[in-house]
Image (cartoon, rainbow, N blue to C red):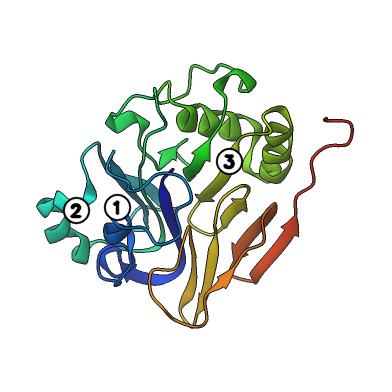
């Protein structure tokens, strides 16, 4: 269910991350190589990046409910969009969830951009008026924003305990920090000389890609990369 990608590092064009790689998100929208659930991601796409022309950086988003492979307008503009922090996703909607722009990642609270690759029972999430959509991913994003990204690992572990069938791969960034969880689906990391890529699956065959173990939290900052195991709360089962 969905594929996503995050970048933190030097300013690069969105196209070099999303469209140009041989197995980038555009290709993953119709032929993902490691997706365990669903065959393609044709139910929308979204790209978010931080605009540093504004003091402090402002998150900007371009989202669509149509397949990424057919968007000629984005194809023509993406090479001109440059940022040092990007969150992008292509969507395979969970059965019963709406296919609409507001249900498409990345979601935002005005400070963070967040994508969810997976599925979760909305019944274990608190209802919140700040959710952009009634879909599970939007409600999960609103829950995470409300509880704070510093608590992301604990939040994912708690929700995972409440819904044992959930898949909770989350990717979030705020311009200077990138966080991701591997919980029930694939996640890989590429440490480049100019920055770090986190992605549902590698966008090329570079041998430097590393797989993140399941039930782990990854944090990327200017100081480096840290990985922390995530354990379900004691007595949760």
Q: CA distance from mark 1 to mark 2?
A: 7 Å
Q: Are the residues at dot 2 and dot 3 in contact (C-beta closer than 8 Å)?
A: no
Quadrant of image for the C terminus: top right
Query: Residue 6 sits in which quadrant?
Result: bottom left
Among all residues in the image, which is located at the extreme right? Answer: 235
Q: Residues within 10 Å of mark 1 (few under 14, many from 20)?
A: many
Earlier in the chain: of badge 3 and badge 1, it is 1
Q: Residue 111: where, in percent of width, then height?
A: 48, 43
Q: Is residue 236 above or below residue 174?
A: above
Whether tag 1 and tag 2 are in contact, CB under 8 A, the answer is yes
Which of marks 2 and 1 precedes in the sequence? 1
Q: Residue at x 70, y 45 (%)?
A: 153
Q: Which residue is mark 3?
A: 167
- Mark 3 lies on a secondary structure that is strand
For disc 2, the marked residue is 69
> Percent position (x, y) of residue 123?
60, 18
Number of other residues with Cα within 10 Å of mark 2, as a class: few under 14, some 14 to 19, many 20 or more: some
Q: Is residue 108 or residue 237 the one in the foreground?
A: 237
Q: Residue 191: which disc?
A: none
- For marks 2 and 3, give the CA distance: 26 Å
Q: Residue at x 25, y 64 (%)?
A: 19
Q: Residue at x 41, y 78 (%)?
A: 205
Q: Is residue 41 left or right of residue 10?
A: left
Q: Earlier in the sequence, mark 2 or mark 3?
A: 2
Helix or strand or loop: what does disc 1 sit on? loop
Which numbered dot is residue 29? Answer: 1
The CA span between labels 3 and 1 is 19 Å
């Amino acid at each position: 269910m969905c594929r996503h990608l995050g970048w933190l590092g030097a300013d690069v064009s969105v196209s070099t991350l999303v469209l140009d790689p041989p197995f980038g998100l555009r290709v993953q929208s119709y032929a993902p190589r490691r997706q365990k659930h669903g065959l393609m991601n044709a139910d929308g796409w979204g790209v978010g990046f931080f605009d540093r022309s504004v003091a402090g950086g402002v998150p900007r988003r371009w989202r669509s409910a149509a397949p990424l492979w057919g968007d000629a307008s984005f194809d023509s503009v993406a090479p001109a969009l440059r940022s040092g922090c990007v969150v992008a996703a292509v969507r395979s909607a969970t059965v019963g969830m709406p296919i609409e722009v507001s249900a498409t990642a990345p979601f935002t609270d005005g400070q963070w951009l967040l994508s969810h690759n997976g599925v979760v029972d909305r019944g274990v999430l608190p209802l919140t008026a700040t959710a952009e959509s009634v879909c599970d991913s939007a409600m999960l994003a609103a829950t995470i924003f409300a509880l704070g990204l510093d608590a992301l690992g604990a939040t994912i572990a708690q929700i995972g305990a409440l819904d044992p069938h959930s898949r909770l791969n989350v990717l979030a960034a705020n311009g200077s920090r990138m966080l991701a969880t591997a919980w029930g689906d694939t996640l890989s990391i590429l440490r480049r000389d100019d920055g770090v890529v986190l992605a549902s699956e590698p966008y090329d065959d570079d041998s430097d890609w590393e797989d993140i173990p399941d039930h782990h939290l990854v944090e990327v900052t200017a100081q480096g990369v840290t990985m922390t195991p995530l354990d379900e709360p004691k007595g949760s089962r």
